[in-house]
Image: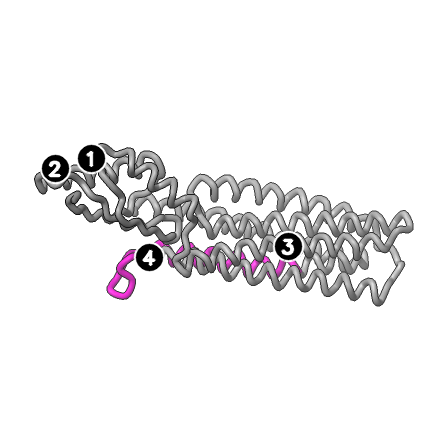
């Protein structure tokens, strides 16, 4: 568990990086968008202010996850990270719907006026900056298996797409193709909505104690390779933050002593830790009939 808490500390750094990036980029976009009279850049800046809220939610979730077990939470508070992912996904879906709404409104109330080209320069710079934040957070999230930071990283990527869409719209308007702006916005909104939905589906699946059959088959295969295991009679797994909680019943030879049977459970625990980095295992041994 100590390793899990240390990983959560690392994930918090990524969430803080996101918050700092979003504050900086939103101020830059809102300032330049106002003076350059770019509605697209202003909308992108407002979008980033909502991302600050999502990143703060992830950071709070990670901090709560590090709280040790207590009387009300005997398994600890690790699921707060998953709840933070759920909140971030809902914010992403809301942003995606807002981008789609504004794209449709741009088509209905079409305005051919082209904003200052400096808006496109700022937008592409911000896209590159937030993409670098995405790469940083994604690398950490994959390494420490943090669902909360993974959600933040995917949010970073969706915002990079929004800024790219903004750039395309502004540049296209300079060459007499202002209709490309709402079209790019529709495509970007679809990407945001898909990303938000994927995170929402995974978070709700984990919170409802769902678990991938493919992963469970891999765990079963690993256990079956432990010497002395005759049969896996029952196995259940669930996601708890960045950990997997595993309960299983295995049968062993009825001729084994209690000490020998317990030795097999220790081998199972060692095998799961070595192969799959699973450390939270409850093994019940029954005699083979």
Cα distance between the residues tagged 3 and 4: 32 Å
Element carrying mark 2: helix
Element carrying mark 3: helix
Marking on residue 192: 3
Cα distance between the residues tagged 2 and 3: 54 Å
Going from the N terminus, do you reach mark 3 or mark 4 first? 4
Q: Which-is-in-front pick, marks 4 and 2?
A: 2
Tag 4–tag 2 contact (CB < 8 Å): no
Which residue does the image show at 22% across and 38% down from the upper left? Answer: 230
Tag 1–tag 4 contact (CB < 8 Å): no
Instruction: Please name the residue that numbered disc 4 is placed on.
Output: 67
Q: Residues within 10 Å of mark 2 (few under 14, many from 20)?
A: few
Measuring from the top left, give residue 71's x and y in whole percent.
Answer: 24, 64
Q: Which-is-in-front pick, marks 2 and 3?
A: 2
Cα distance between the residues tagged 1 and 4: 38 Å
Q: Which-is-in-front pick, marks 2 and 1?
A: 1
Element carrying mark 4: loop
Which residue does the image show at 71% across and 61% down from the upper left? Answer: 100
Tag 3–tag 4 contact (CB < 8 Å): no
Tag 2–tag 3 contact (CB < 8 Å): no
Instruction: Please name the residue that numbered disc 2 is placed on.
Output: 260
Going from the N terminus, do you reach mark 1 or mark 4 first? 4
- Tell me if 69 is positioned left or right of 253 in this view: right
Instruction: Please name the residue that numbered disc 1 is placed on.
Output: 228
Read off the magenta span: 47-76
């Amino acid at each position: 568990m100590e390793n899990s808490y240390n990983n959560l500390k690392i994930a918090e750094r990524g969430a803080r990086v996101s918050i700092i990036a979003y504050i900086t980029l939103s101020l830059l976009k809102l300032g330049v968008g106002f003076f350059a009279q770019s509605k697209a850049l202003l909308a992108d800046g407002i979008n980033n202010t909502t991302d600050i809220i999502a990143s703060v939610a992830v950071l709070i979730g990670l901090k709560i996850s590090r709280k040790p077990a207590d009387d009300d939470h005997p398994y600890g508070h690790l699921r707060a990270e998953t709840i933070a992912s759920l909140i971030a996904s809902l914010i992403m879906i809301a942003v995606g719907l807002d981008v789609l709404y504004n794209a449709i409104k741009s088509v209905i109330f079409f305005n051919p006026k082209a904003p200052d080209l400096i808006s496109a320069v700022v937008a592409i710079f911000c896209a590159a900056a937030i993409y670098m934040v995405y790469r940083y957070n994604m690398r950490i999230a994959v390494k420490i298996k943090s669902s909360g930071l993974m959600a933040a990283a995917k949010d970073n990527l969706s915002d990079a797409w929004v800024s790219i869409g903004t750039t395309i719209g502004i540049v296209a308007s300079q060459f007499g193709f202002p209709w490309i702006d709402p079209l790019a916005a529709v495509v970007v909104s679809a990407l945001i909505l898909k990303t938000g939905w994927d995170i929402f589906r995974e978070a709700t699946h984990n919170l409802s104690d769902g678990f991938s059959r493919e992963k469970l088959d891999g765990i079963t295969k690993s256990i079956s390779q432990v010497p002395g295991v005759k049969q896996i009679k029952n196995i259940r797994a669930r996601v708890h933050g960045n950990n997997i909680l595993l309960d299983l019943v295995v049968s062993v030879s009825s001729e084994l002593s209690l000490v020998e049977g317990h030795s097999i459970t220790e081998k199972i625990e060692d095998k799961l830790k070595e192969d799959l980095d699973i450390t939270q295992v409850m093994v019940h041994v029954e005699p083979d009939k």
